C-alpha cells in the first residue's frame, strides 16, 4: 500500500510539470484552438476592416502570380497581409474581407486561418514573442530563456503585458535548431541565447530600439560554433577536377 501511494504521488507530481503540446495555440487562437468562432465586442462580423489602398495594390501584385481562376491559391499571403495591417491578429471580419477579395466562400478562408498557427485569432501585443521549446532548443536550455522572459515581463505563456507591448507564446520548431536556443519576435530571429541576452533584447524593445537579429554569441549565421572546419579557402574556378578531355 505504501509503495502504491508513493508511485501515485510521484506520477501526480510529474503530470503537473508536463507542458502539454499546443497549450499556447489554444490560448492564442492559433491552430489546435477551438475551431468555432465566438463573437466578442472586438471580434465579430461587424468589426470594421478594409484593406488600405496600398495593400489592395499589393494584393493585385500577389494575384498576378496565380493563373486565372486560381485566386484561392493566394489565401495565405493575403491573410498574412490582413494580419499585418491589423496589428498582428485576424478578426473574423478580416477573414470575410479576404474571402470577398479572393471570390471564395468564407468557410474556405476560416479553414486556412484556423489550421496554421501563424495566424492569430485574438489580439497580440506589439511584440509577439515566440519561444521555441522543441527538443533541440530544450536540450540547449530553452526553459531558462522562457523563465527569463516570464520573470522580466511578469506574464505567463499565452498572456499579454498590461501595456499591450508584449505577448508571450510557446511554439514548436522554428527551423533554427543549429542556433538553439532561439526566439522569434515578430519577423526577427534571435539565436544562441542566454538569459541575459533575452533580457537585453526586451530592454531594447521597451526603449523603442530594434535589436540586431541573429546569433548573440558572435558567430556568423549558422556557422559551426568552433569556427569553420571546411570551405576555408577561396572557391576554385570553373573546370576544377574535370577531365581535360571532357
Image (cartoon, rainbow, N blue to C red):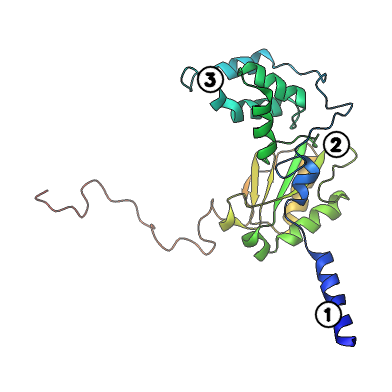
Q: Mark number for residue 164?
A: 2
Asked whether 150 or 112 is in front, the reply is: 112
Q: Residue furthest bottom?
A: 2
Q: Mark number for residue 63?
A: 3
Closer to the chain start, of discs 1 and 3, is 1
Residue 187 place in picture, x, y as percent: 65, 38
Circle 1 or circle 3, nearest the eye: 1
Quarter containing the N terminus: bottom right
SS label for mark 3: helix
User: On the image, which quarter does residue 162 sit in?
Assistant: top right
Q: Residue at x 76, y 22 (%)?
A: 93
Q: CA distance from mark 3 to mark 2?
A: 34 Å
User: On the image, which quarter does residue 218 sit in?
Assistant: bottom right
Q: Is residue 160 above or below residue 16?
A: above
Q: Residue furthest left?
A: 245
Q: Mark number for residue 137?
A: none
Q: Mark number for residue 7?
A: 1
Closer to the chain start, of discs 3 and 2, is 3
User: On the image, which quarter does residue 59 sit in?
Assistant: top right
Left or right of 236, for residue 159:
right
Left or right of 40, for residue 218:
left
Residue 169 place in picture, x, y as percent: 76, 47
Q: CA distance from mark 1 to mark 3?
A: 60 Å
Q: Residue at x 66, y 17 (%)?
A: 100
SS label for mark 1: helix
Q: Is residue 176 above or below residue 8?
A: above
Circle 3 or circle 2, nearest the eye: 3
Amino acid at each position: 500500500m505504501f509503495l502504491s501511494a508513493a508511485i501515485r504521488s510521484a506520477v501526480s507530481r510529474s503530470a503537473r510539470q508536463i507542458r502539454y503540446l499546443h497549450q499556447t495555440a489554444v490560448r492564442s487562437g492559433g491552430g489546435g484552438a477551438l475551431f468555432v468562432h465566438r463573437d466578442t465586442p472586438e471580434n465579430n462580423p461587424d468589426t470594421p476592416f478594409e484593406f488600405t489602398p496600398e495593400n489592395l495594390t499589393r494584393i493585385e501584385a500577389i494575384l498576378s502570380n496565380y493563373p486565372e481562376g486560381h485566386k484561392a491559391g493566394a489565401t495565405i499571403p493575403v491573410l498574412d497581409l490582413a494580419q499585418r495591417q491589423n496589428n498582428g491578429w485576424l478578426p473574423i471580419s478580416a477573414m470575410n474581407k479576404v474571402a470577398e477579395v479572393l471570390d471564395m466562400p468564407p468557410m474556405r478562408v476560416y479553414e486556412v486561418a484556423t489550421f496554421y498557427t501563424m495566424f492569430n485569432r485574438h489580439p497580440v501585443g506589439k511584440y509577439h514573442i515566440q519561444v521555441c521549446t522543441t527538443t533541440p532548443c530544450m536540450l540547449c536550455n530553452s526553459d531558462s530563456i522562457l523563465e527569463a522572459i516570464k520573470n522580466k515581463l511578469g506574464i505567463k505563456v499565452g498572456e499579454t503585458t498590461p501595456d499591450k507591448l508584449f505577448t508571450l507564446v510557446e511554439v514548436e520548431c522554428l527551423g533554427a535548431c543549429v542556433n538553439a536556443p532561439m526566439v522569434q519576435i515578430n519577423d526577427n530571429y534571435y539565436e544562441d541565447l542566454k538569459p541575459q541576452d533575452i533580457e537585453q533584447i526586451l530592454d531594447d524593445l521597451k526603449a523603442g530600439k530594434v535589436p540586431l537579429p541573429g546569433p548573440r554569441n558572435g558567430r556568423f549565421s549558422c556557422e559551426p560554433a568552433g569556427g569553420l572546419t571546411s570551405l576555408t579557402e577561396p572557391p576554385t574556378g570553373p573546370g576544377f577536377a574535370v577531365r581535360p578531355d571532357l
